[in-house]
Image (spheres, helix red, strand yellow):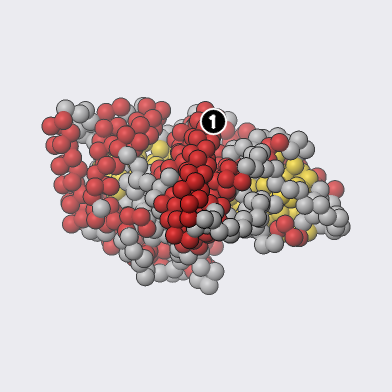
Amino acid sequence: MTPPIVQSPVRSGSRTYKGFGVSPGIAIGRAVIVEKKVASVYRVPIKEEDVGREVNRFLEALDVTRRELLDLKKKVSRSMGEEYASIFEAHALMVSDPSFADKVIQKIESEQVNAEWAVSEVQEELEARFESFEDEYLRDRGADVKDVGDSLLKNLQGIAHHDLSEITHDIIILADDLLPSDTVHFNRRPIVGFATESGGRTSHTSIIAKSLFMPAVIGVPRLTQIVDNDELVIVDGYEGTIVVNPSPALVAEYRSRVSRHEEYERKLLENRTIPATTKDDRQISLQANIELVEELNDAIRYGAEGIGLYRSEFLYISKSPVLPTEEEHFNLYRRLAEALDPNWVVIRTFDLGGRKLAREVIGSKENNPVLGLRGLRLCMKHRDMFKTQLRAILRASAFGKIKLMFPLVSGLQELRQVKTLVREIKSELDAEGIAYNPELQIGIMIEVPAAAIIADLLATEVDFLSIGTNDLIQYSLAIDRSNENVGYLYEPLHPAILRLVSMVIQAGRKAGIPVSMCGEMASDPLYAIVLLGLGLEIYSMNPSAIPVIKNVIRSVRYKDCKRIAELSLQKKTAQEIEEFVIESVAMRFPDGLVNNNP
């Protein structure tokens, strides 16, 4: 059903509203405010002899919904790739999952009510359950439940299906919320961007928006009440803002910004094939962090020399509540290896737990999940799930240059335990006659202060180290950067952080193994100078940041950066270090080296 367009008189005056940018870019167009409504659902008592007929009606609608979702999966697979298609495969599985279908049937039979009411009640119960989760990933899965439930109700009620792409105007969609099945139908024109009141950074809607390169902002309070239909709207996915009814001068400024971004990116991409070498010939490797196979195109486009971090959690999340099979793991990892050859791809095993709380796996709520069952410790507790992934990675290693990396390692004992598990799996594969790379390299994430402090011990038992600064900073400084009360204390240049990073780099050098950094700190031009001076030689980051960091590296001398790092380690506060680095950059390096954004 085409969402109704809300008609209202156009207000005057330019207004700016703040949300969260989830897909970068700038879009300018006329607002189309949409509301998604399923026709009213009423509770209708039915006779006992009609219960069987009502259950059959529900099962028929269930089958129709499942076939529609599988058709949508095929369409998305052709246009966007298998990983996005798996979202709708999971939706198709959800409609027949006992936690949904059996509850609906039970409600129809026990309460003798119509199927629409039973579906609506079960849907609300499941949505409320997801909404209660502290974990952002699981809360965002509530949108998937709503998507499935709404589709099922439409089929029960005989409502015709339409989608937003049927609107033929050049528009920006504003809505209270958008479901994955809405967003996947968006084409580049006429819909040029969208914004919503709700939604999460990790929702499937946000992920799909990024894949479509469509500017998107979420979390704008009361958006559909404060903006009128047909008002001119600017969606700024970089800053996470919505500008409504902008002046002609402001529109011209944003159009100029678009042009500057495009020109800036074009110039940066000219160095795509040029090595990241300092002016005094120190070679640096710039790699990409990705979570979708489809992001490989971006990684290659921006000049990545391999994948320094493949986050395997998305496969789990896209299949939730069903666990991925060994073949699903294997096919995905093989695609990665073959696409990257002859470059390396580092596959990090499931880093679930914490804010990515795997409730289906853990089975209970944790009072302090960030310090609880997460990362490697969760996987080692649930070895059947873990062995499925490890077998697939080992099998895929026969088809390209794969490295295996474990998250949240805190000591030698757990490292030795997981290495023993890998050896056991190798023996199983040998017995089954299944090929793998017997020399598969094994590395660990350094993201716990304890691991950084004993990096010299850990380095003697692995093939490489990778510093995860996001968690290392959080754990070291005892702060949650998403907490507005303490977020100001999130300081990557804190003396303690620089000392820990330096310790890890030196430990790797002494052991003769490579050390990389895959946290956000690696993608900041200012920090890159200090890290270069500390001796870091492998940076892994969001693909779009690679040309910027390459520009920085090619503009500096290693000996200058080394001096800056040495003097930074002598400073006492993060503020002193930052001021010193900025002053040093201004004195030694070309103008605009740090302020690279247009």
Residue furthest to the bottom in view is: 485
Tell me what residue is drawn at x 55 percent, y 59 percent: 45
Q: In this view, does 555 lie to the left or right of 403?
A: right
Q: Quadrant of residue 134?
A: bottom left
Instruction: Pinpoint residue 490: horizontal percent, then vertical percent.
Output: 48, 65
Label 1, residues with CA under 10 Å away: few <14, some 14-19, many ≥20: some
Q: In this view, does 136 lie above or below 533?
A: below
Query: Circle 1 sits in a helix, a strand or a loop, which is it?
Result: helix
Instruction: Pinpoint residue 512: horizontal percent, then vertical percent.
Output: 24, 43
Residue assigned mark 1: 75
Q: Can residue 547 be seen in this view?
A: no
Along the viewing direction, whichever of 44 and 295 lies nearer the viewer: 44
Along the viewing direction, whichever of 498 and 150 lies nearer the viewer: 150
Along the viewing direction, whichever of 160 and 381 lies nearer the viewer: 160
Residue furthest to the front in view is: 49
Along the viewing direction, whichever of 247 and 357 lies nearer the viewer: 357
Tell me what residue is drawn at x 81 percent, y 57 percent: 14
Q: In which quarter of the image is the N terminus?
A: top right
Figure label count: 1
What's under tag 1, amino acid-wise? Lys
Q: In which quarter of the image is residue 501?
A: bottom left
Q: Can residue 60 be seen in this view?
A: yes
